Amino acid sequence: DELTFLHFKALATDVLKPLPAEIVPEVRAFEESGFVHVSFIPNRQLQPFGQVVVESPRGFPMFCNFAQFFQRGNMPISVQCEAANTFAVISLSGGETLAKDTHYYFALRVTNPSPADFDNFHPTGETFWKVRMQTASAALVQKTDQATGYHPTLTSVSRFTVKPTSEPALPMTATPVEIMFKLESVLLQFRDNIIRVTAPTNHTFECYYVFGNLSFVDPAETVRPITQGTRDAELFGHLGEVLEQPPPTTSSEFTNVGMTADGRRIVDCSQPDEMLIAVDFTDLRTKGRYSFQTTVYTPGEIRPPNMWRIETTAGDGPIDSGATGGFQVYYQGTSSISGAPVAPIWVSSLLALAAAVAFVLQ
């Protein structure tokens, strides 16, 4: 009858609605391994013991069977991940669900193909990832076969990390952060070189407020050296030493300490979540490794995906890019992402030590 028909039609439309999903790699270089961040917003609930199945394009094998190769993001605390070749399965426990209309994200390890394999598997240059939510019995809940992937590049920004100078980071506070990265391309002096650093949603760089008051920022106060006497300070050169410079204060071309002679901003903080840093050149002395400290205002609540991004450009063209997962902001007793209890201090310290050792050994 008509009532039954209308009911069936509504159910079918709901099931077939594509799953909104985004794929963001940390490292884009050919034949390099790094994390790929997967974020999605289901419009149907996934019940206990349900699974999220990720299928990568040919030539992009994934690995997540050990904790160091899987970042839980804001997924439930007991999820498990197993992967083989181009398939990864993230499984819920019996007491966990994924709520509808909630933004989830996680990251797993992937190895990019060689140029020859990529051209062979993907002659058009396009790649698409598949993300499928299913029940424990593999019944479809929601999926997409068209999550846009990425084209690997010959070089990329690697070893990109952002960490607060002290932990835990608290909500709605001015938090100094140390930003480190490795450029695989040399920035030449005769070009207009820009390093763009983009913070996660709802984060605001402190320099944005300074820029709003003065229409410029002092590079020395915004791009500061990281903590001295540390291993990171030894490995990474200070970015502030290779920035564009203002003309002498006695020159008729001098406007302020934040402007070059030809009127370009040395550090552009005109957007709340973005810094554009004008670099004069980079050299081989630091092997492309640079760092700086700046201050960011943390939000009251982090909105997924919690991602920092970096991009280098020369003239009008992009050169390299990279990304990394952001740090968590903690309320008293819970994290602002998942509401999960905060780990004991000794656990956090152990994890931080392990991450630091792995980072230095890269």
Image (cartoon, rainbow, N blue to C red):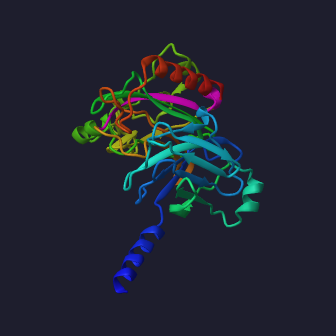
Give x and y (percent) for residue 36. 57, 46
Please identify the residue farthest to the top as the structure is shown: 229
Quadrant where the N terminus sits is bottom left
Indicate left or right for 78 with 28 as reference: left
Residue at image point 59% right, 27% down: 359
> In this view of the protein, which residue sits in the foreground, 310 or 44?
44
Q: Is residue 96 magenta?
A: no
Indicate left or right for 31 with 280 as reference: right
Give x and y (percent) for residue 224. 41, 26
Quadrant where the C terminus sits is top right
Q: Quadrant of residue 149?
A: bottom right
Range of residues picked out in magenta: 284-299
Give x and y (percent) for residue 94. 48, 43
Q: Is residue 293 magenta?
A: yes
Query: How many circles with numbers are drawn on the protein?
Result: 0
Q: Quadrant of residue 201?
A: top left
